Image (cartoon, rainbow, N blue to C red):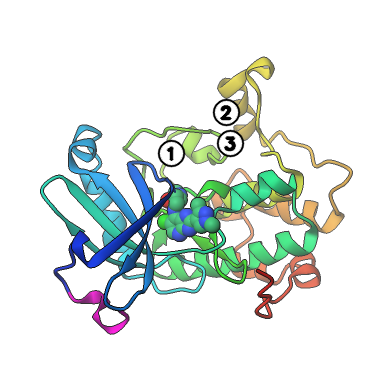
């Protein structure tokens, strides 16, 4: 499957289709196995009608263009694409240990070592993307998967674009990860991913997004206000090192956020990150 994976002319008949793994934005993702090589993949199946109705064909084309050319241990590979009369199929790398947000739900929150290790893996993937002028724009636990060693893998480049950019398509879903420049519909660049990294560090350590407001607390309007006013507090349980890193990431001006290479060198990261010495505790 390796060499041939870029050969064109795949069809669904080349694959055995297994259980549904979950829902991406516009379609179901299934476990799949290429019949000849027995290579296991994740097959993302989208209905052309659905894509047309939501006017996202251009977004999908961009996602495919971007993700098929990215090769990084912490980015889910897109091996190929094919379609039939009604559906588009993306052949994706299968991440055996599932979605990070499920693990976060189960554990409530992660410790400093687990969080610093995820941050190291995510920051190195984002450096790789930013070097290619690609910004992800949708970093959040729902879009992060776990490989065989429990290592982090970015999935779903559905919102990624070439930097700089101003968003046109409407956002849907939670505001929690929106940067101030997105809330205020200003042009944005790759520093938007650094903001989201800051939100993620906070959420992995506490189990809550820093600016989240329930409907009783004022809902999305209040969340948006707290984002643009950078109004959050770190719980006393959070280590000073982590609070310092978050403070340097959740900065209003994108150009003043800590660059990703300096995130990797931050004392709290250096002190707490673990290397995945192939911990294969299945
Ligand atoms: C945003 C998005 O694409 N979300 C998910 C749906 C499943 N999908 C997967 C993709 Cl695209 C790739 N690999 C996956 N592995 C799993 C998974 C494994 N376990 C044990 N449980 C699950 C679930 N899911 C995937 C991506």
> Viewed as shown, does residue 275 lie left or right of 172?
right
- 141 up-or-down from 183: above or below: below
Q: Nearer the viewer, mark 1 or mark 3?
A: 3
Question: Which residue is located at x 80 percent, y 42 percent?
Answer: 234
Q: Which dot marks residue 224? A: 2
- 144 up-or-down from 176: above or below: below
x, y (%) of residue 173? 47, 33
Mark closest to the chain's N terminus, 2 or 1: 1
Q: Is residue 139 magenta?
A: no
Quarter the N terminus occupies: bottom left
Question: Which residue is located at x 43 percent, y 35 percent?
Answer: 185
> Viewed as shown, does residue 124 lie left or right of 168?
right
| Secondary element at image label 3 | loop
Q: Is residue 3 magenta?
A: yes
| Secondary element at image label 1 | loop
Q: Nearer the viewer, residue 152 or 93?
A: 93
Give the crowd class for mark 3: few <14, some 14-19, many >=20 residues within 10 Å. many
x, y (%) of residue 110? 75, 54
Q: Does the beta carbon at disc 1 come under 8 Å from ligand 1?
A: no
x, y (%) of residue 125? 51, 67
Give the crowd class for mark 1: few <14, some 14-19, many >=20 residues within 10 Å. few
State whether residue 165 appears in this view: no
**Which residues, given as a range, are shown in magenta?**
1-7
Provide the residue designation for mark 1. Answer: 186
Question: Which residue is located at x 23 percent, y 75 percent?
Answer: 6
> Viewed as shown, does residue 53 lie left or right of 255?
left
State whether residue 177 appears in this view: yes
- 204 up-or-down from 152: above or below: above
Q: Quadrant of residue 260?
A: bottom right
* Alpha carbon distance from label 2 to label 3: 8 Å
């Amino acid at each position: 499957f390796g060499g041939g994976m870029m050969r064109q002319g795949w069809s669904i008949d080349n694959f055995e289709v297994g259980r549904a793994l979950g829902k991406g934005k516009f379609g179901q993702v299934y476990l799949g196995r290429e019949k000849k090589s027995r290579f296991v993949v994740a097959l993302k199946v989208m209905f052309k009608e659905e894509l047309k109705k939501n006017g996202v064909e251009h977004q999908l084309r961009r996602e495919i263009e971007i993700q098929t050319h990215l090769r990084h241990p912490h980015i889910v590979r897109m091996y190929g694409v094919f379609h039939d009369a009604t559906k588009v199929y993306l052949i994706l790398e299968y991440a055996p240990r599932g979605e990070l947000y499920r693990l976060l739900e189960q554990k409530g929150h992660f410790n400093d070592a687990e969080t610093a290790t995820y941050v190291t893996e995510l920051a190195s993937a984002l450096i790789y993307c930013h070097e290619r002028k690609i910004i992800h724009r949708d970093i959040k636990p729902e879009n992060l998967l776990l490989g065989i060693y429990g290592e982090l893998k970015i999935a779903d480049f559905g919102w990624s674009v070439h930097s700089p950019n101003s968003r046109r398509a409407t956002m849907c879903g939670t505001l929690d990860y929106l940067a101030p420049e997105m809330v205020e519909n200003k042009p944005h660049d790759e520093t938007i991913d650094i903001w989201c990294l800051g939100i993620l560090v906070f959420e992995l350590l506490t189990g809550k997004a820093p600016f989240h407001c329930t409907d009783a607390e004022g809902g999305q309007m209040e969340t948006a206000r707290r984002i643009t006013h950078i109004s959050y507090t770190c719980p006393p349980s959070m280590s000073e090192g982590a609070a310092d890193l978050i403070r340097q990431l959740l900065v209003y001006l994108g150009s003043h956020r800590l660059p990703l290479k300096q995130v990797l060198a931050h004392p709290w990261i250096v002190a707490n990150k673990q290397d995945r010495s192939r911990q294969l505790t299945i």
